[in-house]
Image (cartoon, rainbow, N blue to C red):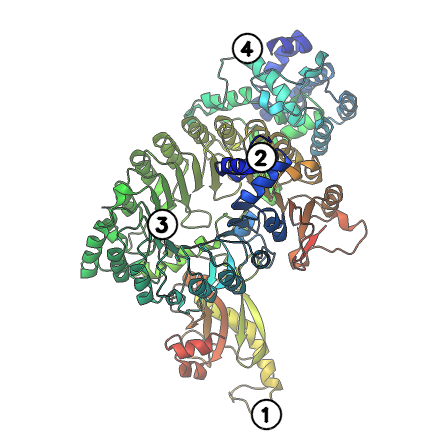
Amino acid sequence: MMEECSKGSGAACSPKLLDLIPKEMEWAVAKGKNGDVERSSVEIRKLELRLGLPGDDEWSLKNTNTAKNMNRERDHHDSLFSLGYFNHGHHHNHHHHFHHHQPSHKAGSHEMSPQVGPVAGSSSSSVWFNQQQQQLAPPSSFLQFPTTTKAATDKQQSSCLLLPTVAKESSQLCCTKVGAIDLQQGPAEKKAFSPPAAPPTPANTAVANSSQKRTAPGPVVGWPPIRSFRKNLASSSSSSKQQQTTDSQSGNPNKKAATSDKPVEVCKKGMFVKINMDGVPIGRKVDLTAYDSYPRLSTAVDELFRGLLAAQRDSSAGGNINKQQQEGEEKAITGLLDGSGEYTLVYEDNEGDRMLVGDVPWHMFVSTVKRLRVLKSSEVSALSLGCSKQEKMVAMK
Amino acid sequence: MNYFPDEVLEHIFDFVGSHKDRNSVSQVCKLWYRIESYSRQTVFVGNCYAIGPERVAERFSGLKSITLKGKPHFADFNLVPPDWGGFVYPWIEAFARSRVGLEELRLKRMVVSDESLELLSRSFPNFKSLVLVSCEGFTTDGLAAVAAYCRQLKELDLQENDVEDHRGHWLSCFPESSTSLVSLNFACLKGDINLPALERLVARSPNLKSLRLSRAVPLDVLQRILIRAPQLLDLGVGSYLHDPDSENYNKLVTAIQKCKSVRSLSGFLDVAPHCLSAFHIICPNLTSLNLSYAPGIYDNELIKLIRHCHKLQRLWILDCIGDKGLEVVASTCKDLEELRVFPSDPYVGQAAVTEEGLVAISRGCQKLNSILYFCQQMTNAALITVAKNCPNFVRFRLCILDPTKPDAVTQQPLDEGFGAIVQACKGLKRLSLSGLLTDQVFLYIGMYAEQLEMLSIAFAGDSDKGMQYVLKGCKKLRKLEIRDSPFGNAALLMDVAKYETMRSLWMSSCEVTLGGCKALAKRMPGLNVEIINENDQMEFVGGCDDDRQKVEKMYLYRTLAGQRRDAPEFVWTL
């Protein structure tokens, strides 16, 4: 490997190659300074021209084009992509040969090409590896990293040195200075290349947020990847826990607002349950994850139905149950939770039982509720909720 | 090849067990294909839409046991709408028509209706074993049919299914003459159970080796059951709530002492943790312990229990055990091979284990080969240490609860750590990634993970290159599932032939467009490329503007059965 290395690249490249790796940190540091960047990238360009890719024509084409685009901020994705695309057909066994001879030798300097893409990874990585091995201490794999985190700097350095870091290399050497600089300045660099000992640069967080897909503030659908079966465990067992002395440990599910992903609704963020009100033919849906307590839910129910109820009363002929209400005026729906109002809030749980809202802790309620109903309080007392089996049968509809 | 009579070949093939090997055997020549096909008794179909049941029945005339898997893995996490598919009914019906002598049916992530269970129970007189994992669509009425009509039933194993409980008395549907039961697991049922019927059933089942109870079975019944069935090997405790001073508890202790054969313990669905000490006596015999359904057990109780479990090979627990608890595991359970640590609070913030616990485990448990670890944070250094300590991983699944969290100490991506894992663990077959990851990690995976068969990616990578590295490098890849990662058409279309060497590919919330999927479908007619379009996110009006729309969910799989006919409206097969 050594031989191949020196064969194609020539002495001139070695010091440059070496320099580039440890200077990763400098890249990051120097990214704002055009001068340094300029210099190194010029060296890179020379390197590029010397080392050709198997797909040589496209390569140099890309090369020259992008050489002009040194300071452009975009396109690094495109350039990396197309280079990878060109190369894909050429090498297939690359990954086996990190420590062995390259299988797909081609005569001349092609082997030495620091290629972009997976192909690049293998052949250039071997190259890198051996060069580095020669020049530095001989840890040959990940496994020899110092394990203490105090040696973060060393680790970072050695990790850069020893591992085939095609993305980095490609950005440094190959393709495009655009690619190089952009990659440095782009998300990958900000994540990967910042000086290990330094605290996270503001760039880190900026980048992390720029890739919108991958920031996940708050609950994300299907995350964390555990089955619904498990998500409901914490809340459903909390009833038993209430009977015991609580050594408040981190495993205590009572603390948590178990807004579980129980598929009451299909794969949506938030948990929407149907809510119907006596006397109102059209139901609503309410997102339980938007509330964290019963009073809030009660207020929401009031808001949802106040208008509808008023409309119903307007349209119903003649005498109202509640004489205090004037036509056209909306009356607040209160006392839903304590039986004091005209209406009472009940729900149907996962076992099909109709239950009074408010008995259990909120998170437990959220995890077991299937739908809500706003019943006339007069009916509620007649129904003896959740007690007798007969009622259950009836209520299960 | 013609030297041996068929019977001899058949006899030789009997020794070839794994379905992969049998598949290879059948490729040798026509004769071997024929003999292998009629002599194969156990068939594995990893994707129920990859082939039609008629064809399976036709080829494997001696079929006795079949395993079917339906929905894609991400369905477990609510990423697949219900009604997507995975119905077992057509299979049961086809087998019934073809008079397959079905004895065993094992299903995972399939929709099982009561009708299918009824048909099953009536169509196969020798039916012995029903195992349902993560299935749905049936009720206790279906179970009643199975109990009543499967006269030779030995195994009824319901794992984590979503069963609608009609509170029928399915347990009492086991005829009084039924004494063949070996394994009964109904832990996932939520409703009431006919307790006397259960006790009678256990009493008349002398071969019962595995019994996992649901929450509805209280302590006193448990105690009586244990007295009746001291020969149990595998016990799942239902409800474990009681007063430690009660007579019931004392009786339980006595009963447990008699259960010297129990090797596997699980359940504790409702639990009074202080009373776990009753089980300490059987802990030294345990090889498998699953306390992951029991959030009520605090770390100190867990630790006390685990200290007795020297022979443990498999441990599933909740993260409330904490890093300290894991250290105890590491020092006690030297034979540990599989560890799963689940989050007790599924939402970000409160996981009680960190990279330290994982490192401790790796130091203490040299035989560890399978891990699923939900944690608060991770570092490259820890992963590298773990890789060094445990090069034998076959399954390595790490889930940091905050999906794009970097190395907790250095704030770097976790590329290096995972890279170390794939490099050190030469036999790695399954990998799940999490944390902040760039294309680099995929380069490592492509380079080193030669045996990798299943890879799960979420919120990772920077560009198409990431996915391309994987597709190029992982020759043995069978299942690839990706969500919320910036891989687009270039990656998707890079090597379309590869998908025929794989079982399936799932991509959701990526950069793949409708045009890319169409192109893929066009080039590869042997694949079903399904677009799952819930909520009418996409318009399929026609015209090239459509094609630039991003596809929210795509699932493709190789198939011999062509486009499936049971796809719902929101699934388009291109």
Residue A19, compared with residue B386, is above or below; it is above
Residue, disc 1: A318
**Alpha carbon of mark 1 to alpha carbon of mark 4: how far?**
97 Å
How packed mark 1 is, by other alpha carbons closer than 10 Å (few <14, some 14-19, many 20 or more), is few
Element marked by disc 2: helix
Say which amino acid is labelled 3: Gly
Q: Is residue B411 left or right of residue B527?
A: left
Q: Amino acid at mark 2?
A: Ser
Pointer 2: what residue?
B24
Could you classify mark 2 by the number of other residues whose Cα lies within 10 Å: few (under 14), some (14-19), or many (20 or more)? few
Residue type beneath disc 4: Gln
**Three-letter amino acid code of the residue under disc 1:** Gly
Say few, some or many: other residues with alpha carbon within 10 Å of mark 3 (under 14 / 14 to 19 / 20 or more): many
Q: Earlier in the sequence, mark 1 or mark 4?
A: 4
| Mark pair 4, 2: CA separation | 45 Å
Q: Chain of mark 2?
A: B
- Pinpoint residue A88: horizontal percent, then vertical percent: 70, 28
Q: Which residue is mark 4?
A: A134
